[in-house]
Amino acid sequence: MLVNEIFYSLQGESEMQGKPCIFLRLYGCNMKCNWCDTMYAVKGGDFVRMDILDILGKVEELAEKYKCSMLEITGGEPLIQKEEIRKLITLLIAKNSKIKTILIETNGKDFVIDKFLQTLSTFIIDIKTPSSGEESDLRWMGMNCNKEDMEIYAVFAESWQLKFVIQNKEDFDWAVQLIEKSGSNSKIIFSSPSNSFSISAFFLGTILKLNSSKISSTEVTSFAPCLRSRFGAADIFEVKGAGGANTSFP
């Protein structure tokens, strides 16, 4: 596999934000977002070719060292190496790995119908907003689906986490309109690029407007206690940018 890095940190891009996590960042991507914060995993040749058994060994080493049971496979775009990911997950299961939770973060360019991966991992789908300069496949939100797509959507959509990276108010309004139009029953996450637009001021009003406890934000600060009280939203963390968490709210 083409591997950019393997490391331990805190999860910062899903409903599990703030929890210990091992990251396997694969190299290569089929998008080039304007505000990408991991271009080193997209171009420049910063990768090593690793055998799947060697990757497994490194993941297990970190899992043991940090007593960590969660692995996120990210990129770049990890599903470019989908077959290798299938083999890695198969080995994790066969060897009774310490890893019990697997997250796969995809850019949403392609609607990947893979029941094996969908069943054994949680998908975090980055729905691309206008400022990214890219577009995601909206079948992830139950839109533009044929019969086969809808069958997959009906089974797995509730387990998906749809992440919208918000750079400006136009992105925010676009995302809210899309959520309302789609009626998606996936979990919704708002995030923002480093040193960019702050979505906190709009977040609580959007929750109230959509009346949904499935929407969360990786940038919520002062609203966190209110959200917990109103919606029972637990484990809300402040996150700098779209990456790792740095401050928790007990």
Image (tube, grey):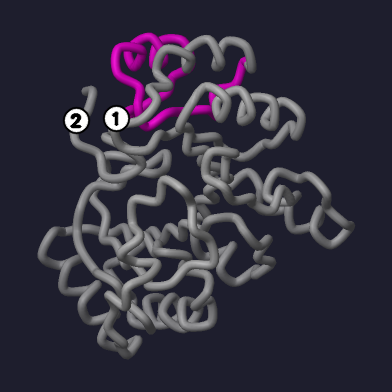
Quadrant housing the C terminus:
top left
> Is 203 in front, or is 198?
198
> Is 72 in front, or is 2?
2
* Residue position marked by numbered label 2 in the rendering: 247
* Residue position marked by numbered label 1 in the rendering: 237
Instruction: Return the disc, 1 or 2, that comes first in the chain's sequence.
Output: 1
Image location (x, y in percent) of residue 8: 19, 59
Regarding mark 1 in the picture, which secondary structure is present there?
A: strand
Q: Is residue 250 left or right of residue 202?
A: left
Residue 227, image quadrant: top left
Q: Residue at x 61, y 23 (%)?
A: 173
In the image, residue 200 sits, relative to residue 246, either above or below, namely: above
Q: Is residue 48 magenta?
A: no
The 10 Å Cα crowd at callout 1, few under 14, some 14 to 19, many 20 or more, is many
Quadrant housing the N terminus:
bottom left
Query: Residue 176 — which label?
Result: none
Q: Amino acid at mark 2?
A: Thr
Q: Residue at x 16, y 59 (%)?
A: 67
Q: Is residue 113 left or right of residue 61?
A: right
The 10 Å Cα crowd at callout 2, few under 14, some 14 to 19, many 20 or more, is few
> Is 186 in front, or is 168?
168
Q: Amino acid at mark 1?
A: Phe
Image location (x, y in percent) of residue 3: 32, 77
Contact, mark 1 vs mark 2 (Cβ under 8 Å): yes
Image location (x, y in percent) of residue 111: 68, 61
In the image, residue 163 sits, relative to residue 46, either above or below, namely: above
Residue 141, image quadrant: top right
Q: Which residues are magenta?
A: 211-238
